[in-house]
Image: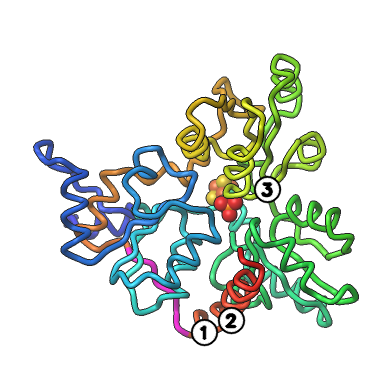
Amino acid sequence: MNIKNSWLKSGYVNETVPANIDLKEEISRLKKEKNAIIMGHFYQTDELQDIADFVGDSLALAQEAAKTDADIIVLAGVHFMGETAKILSPEKVVLVPDLNAGCSLADSCPPDKFKEFVDHHPDHTVLTYVNTTAKIKALSDIVVTSTNAKSIVDSLPTDEKVIFGPDRNLGNYLNSITGRDMVLWDGACHVHEKFSIEKIIELKKENPDALVLAHPECKKPLLVLADFVGSTAALLKHSTNSESTKFIVATESGIIHQMQKYNPDKIFIPAPPNDSTCACNDCEFMKLNTIEKLYNCLKYEWPSIQVPEEIRVEAVKPINKMLDISAKYGL
Ligand code: 13P
Ligand code: SF4
C-alpha cells in the first residue's frame, strides 16, 4: 500500500515526524509560509490550545472562521467544527488533524430520520445545535450554539412553534429557562451524560465552598444541582468573574487549562464520570488530535474538509442567521 492510500484509510497523515525537528518551530514556519491560522477548541489538549492562534468555543470558532483572511484554516477540534468553517469560508482550505474526530451528539441525529421528524412538524421553525452534520444544518432554519441558544430562542415570537435538535438535555434546559415548549429530538453527548451525580455530591460535601459549573449538555439532575450553567466560554468567564476560588467543573476537562491560565490562584476540580477510575471526563474524539498530526496536516494540507456545494448553500443560511442574531446581541 502506498503512503497516500494508508493516509486516506487512517483519516490522518500517519507519517512519523522526524525526531530531530522542533515541532513548534516547524509549525510556526509552515503557518507563515502558507498563510495558515490554527484555531483550537477549549477541549483540545493543553499543548494544542497553547499552539493555536485562536482558542474558543463553537460560536467563537465559527465567527473567527467567517472573518479570517488566512488561506488555510487548521481546525483543531471535531469534524462538525471543521465543516462549519468550510461552509462559511468555502474558498479556504480547512484542515482537521484527524478526520476521525467525530461527535456522538452529531451522530445521534441521522439526516434521513431528522428529515422525517421535520416533515412531521411542517408548521415548526427548525432550530439546531451546531453539533450536527452539514446535512442537518441544510434542513434547519437557524443554528444555535450553547452561547447564543437562549438569546436566539428568546428572539422568536412567543407563539412560534419550534422543533429543537439534536441535544435533549440542552433542549430541556432551554425550555425550562425560556418557558417554551419546543419539540425535542432525542439525542445526547456521551461525555456530558456520563458525569456521576453521586460523585459530584460527594465532592461538594468535601468542598462545600466550591461552585459547581455545568455545561447544558449535562443531564437535568446535574443542571438543577449546578450553581452556574453555560457554554464553555460562559463557564470560563464565570469562573474568572466569580468571587469564589474553588470550582467543580462538569464539562470536558480541556477547559480547565484556560480556567487555570486566567485564574492561577483558583482551584478547579474536574467533575468525575460514572464509569472509570479516572478523575476527569475527556472527549476521546477531541483528544484524537495531536501536535504530530497537526504538523503533518499542515505540511501535506490533508485531510481537508469537503462539503458538497448543494448542501453548503443551504447550510450556510441558518449559520449566517445565527451569526447575525449573535452580532445583534453582542455575542
Ligand atoms: P461549546 O460551544 O460550549 O464550546 O460546546 C462545544 C461542545 O462540543 C460541547 O460538548
Ligand atoms: Fe461531541 Fe460531546 Fe465531544 Fe462535544 S464533548 S465534541 S458534544 S462528543
* Amino acid under disc 1: Val
Callout 3 environment at 10 Å: few (<14), some (14 to 19), or many (20+)? many
Q: Residue at x 51, y 25 (%)?
A: 265
Stretch of the chain drawn in magenta? 304-309
Q: Residue at x 48, y 60 (%)?
A: 61
70 left or right of 77 in image: left
Q: Is mark 3 within 8 Å of ligand 1?
A: yes
Is 305 magenta? The answer is yes
Residue farthest to the left? Answer: 20
20 left or right of 144 in image: left
Is 280 magenta? The answer is no
Q: Relative to 229, say whether 83 is above or below.
A: below
Query: What percent of the width, then of the height, locates residue 273?
Result: 63, 29
Helix or strand or loop: what does disc 1 sit on?
Answer: helix
* Amino acid under disc 3: Gly
Query: What percent of the width, then of the height, locates residue 184?
Result: 79, 61
* Amino acid under disc 2: Lys
Q: Quadrant of residue 192?
A: top right
**Of helix, strand and loop, which mostly describes the magenta segment?**
loop
Which one is earlier in the sequence, the residue at label 3 or at label 1? 3
Q: CA separation, marks 1 and 2?
A: 7 Å
Q: CA separation, marks 2 and 3?
A: 25 Å
What mark, if any, has residue 313 been given in the picture? 1
Q: Residue at x 71, y 14 (%)?
A: 206
Helix or strand or loop: what does disc 2 sit on?
Answer: helix
**Callout 2–callout 3 Cβ contact below 8 Å:** no
Q: Which residue is mark 2?
A: 317
The residue mark sitting in front, 1 or 2, is: 2
Q: Is residue 101 visible?
A: no
Q: Which residue is mark 3?
A: 230
Q: Relative to 248, say whether 14 is above or below.
A: below
Q: Relative to 317, say whether 103 is above or below.
A: above
